Image (cartoon, grey):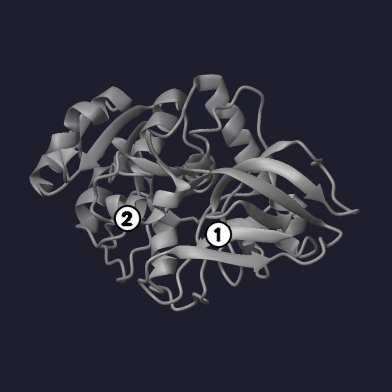
């Protein structure tokens, strides 16, 4: 099967029309006709080879919504005609301790949708059936794409940290990830305090469900909430005044990172005395992604998106890189 895609041929290169051939469909693989695909910052990091593992020509795209058009003879759980989603992960070994325990996203042999293979900035994409997520009835497919990566990245910590509806929580960085975190936590029942460096977003952030917006560039604004937060989710990828945020945690509070901060994090040993914890996570398992999508349909939770036609992919990427996106960008075939 011929696939029409958009690929870069060098680091930081423009995406150009690119055609490649998908060979005979393996027994456990699924072919998806792509209708929508979100643009994630990980796509840009891979495009620029920031993580030193990109292979060119490179077709980005791992927040994929589409329809199953081909199934191998050993495929389970999905069939032709199903509306499905595909995120960062496109397969795992299915036999290691992590896979057998339901944590396929932690499999040491897991396959990523845009690492060493072609992604969803195309009319078709292929993946292992276990990573292909059947979409719940009634979901808005025009907005669902970013949930498959950005959404699960901020939903998984809520489960891992056992956040309770009675908790007071904080979200640092109100962009593509942070705005979804606010929506999830608000509908979880929490009181949500947002930390943002862009005060111009304040009214938008309050409309998402935050009860208060604190300027993250002013550490003194954290003093009134010292010891009050049960959970803080950091969605940024830059170094912060870690100790100021840790002081905002209540005893047994949890500080959770989902942003890929490249520098080592330094914080005082005061976390020991109050049994505070610092942790992090990547995406989430296929089962948890399905649970998250059901939660989104139940509470009408979607990312705030801007839509571009697939053929304007370079304009869409430039829009995102310039920080103009509010708050996720979706490409439509």
The residue carrying mark 1 is 5
Number of callouts in the render? 2
Is residue 173 left or right of 95 when viewed as pictured? left
Give me the residue at 45% from left, 56% from top.
Answer: 280
Q: Is residue 219 visible?
A: yes
Give me the residue at 30% from left, 44% from top.
Answer: 175
The relative height of residue 138 versus residue 276 in the rendered view (above or below) is above
Q: Is residue 189 visible?
A: no
Residue 113 tag number: none
Horizontal and vertical percent position of residue 167: 39, 30
Badge 1 marks a residue whose secondary structure is: strand
- Between residue 54 and residue 5, name the one nearer to us: 5
- Between residue 277 and residue 74, name the one nearer to us: 74
- Between residue 109 and residue 32, name the one nearer to us: 32
Is residue 215 left or right of 164 when viewed as pictured? left
Horizontal and vertical percent position of residue 290: 64, 37
Within-10-Å neighbours for mark 1: few <14, some 14–19, many 20+: many
- Between residue 57 and residue 296, name the one nearer to us: 57
The residue carrying mark 2 is 271
Horizontal and vertical percent position of residue 109: 68, 70
Badge 2 marks a residue whose secondary structure is: helix
Give yes or no for contact between labels 2 and 1 (Cβ–Cβ under 8 Å).
Answer: no
Within-10-Å neighbours for mark 2: few <14, some 14–19, many 20+: some
Give me the residue at 74% from left, 60% from top.
Answer: 1
Q: Which of the 4 image quarters holds residue 309?
A: top left
Q: CA distance from mark 2 to mark 1?
A: 49 Å
Q: Please report whichever mark, 2 or 1, sits nearer to the chain's N-terminal start.
A: 1
Horizontal and vertical percent position of residue 72: 85, 54
Is residue 137 left or right of 15 when viewed as pictured? right
Is residue 204 left or right of 39 when viewed as pictured? left
The relative height of residue 119 versus residue 302 in the rendered view (above or below) is below
Q: Which of the 4 image quarters holds residue 108?
A: bottom right
């Amino acid at each position: 099967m011929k696939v029409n895609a958009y690929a870069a041929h060098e680091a930081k290169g423009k995406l150009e029309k690119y055609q490649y051939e998908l060979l005979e469909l393996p027994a456990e693989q699924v072919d998806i006709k792509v209708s929508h695909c979100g643009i994630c910052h990980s796509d840009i990091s891979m495009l620029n080879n920031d993580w030193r593992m990109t292979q060119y020509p490179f077709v980005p795209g791992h927040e994929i919504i589409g329809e199953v058009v081909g199934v191998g003879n050993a495929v389970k759980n999905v069939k032709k005609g199903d509306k499905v989603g595909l995120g960062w992960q496109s397969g795992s070994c299915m036999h290691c301790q992590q896979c057998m325990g339901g944590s396929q996203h932690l499999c040491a042999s897991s396959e990523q949708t845009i690492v060493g293979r072609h992604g969803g900035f195309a009319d078709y994409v292929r993946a292992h059936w276990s990573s292909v997520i059947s979409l719940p009835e009634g979901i808005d497919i025009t907005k669902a794409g970013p949930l498959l990566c950005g959404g699960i990245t901020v939903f998984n910590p809520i489960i891992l940290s056992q956040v309770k509806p009675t908790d007071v929580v904080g979200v640092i960085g109100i962009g593509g990830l942070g705005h979804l975190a606010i929506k999830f936590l608000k509908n979880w029942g929490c009181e949500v305090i947002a930390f943002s460096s862009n005060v111009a977003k304040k009214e938008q952030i309050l409309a998402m469900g935050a009860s208060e917006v604190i300027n993250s560039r002013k550490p003194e604004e954290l003093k009134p909430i010292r010891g009050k937060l049960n959970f803080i989710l950091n969605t940024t990828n830059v170094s912060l005044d870690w100790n100021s945020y840790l002081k905002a945690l209540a005893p047994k509070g949890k500080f959770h990172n989902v942003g890929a901060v490249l520098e080592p994090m330094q914080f005082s040993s005061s976390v020991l005395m109050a049994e505070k914890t610092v942790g992090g996570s990547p995406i989430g398992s296929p089962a948890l992604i399905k649970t998250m999508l059901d939660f989104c349909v139940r509470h009408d939770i979607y990312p705030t998106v801007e839509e571009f036609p697939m053929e304007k992919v370079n304009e869409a990427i430039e829009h995102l890189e310039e920080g103009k996106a509010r708050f996720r960008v979706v490409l439509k075939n």
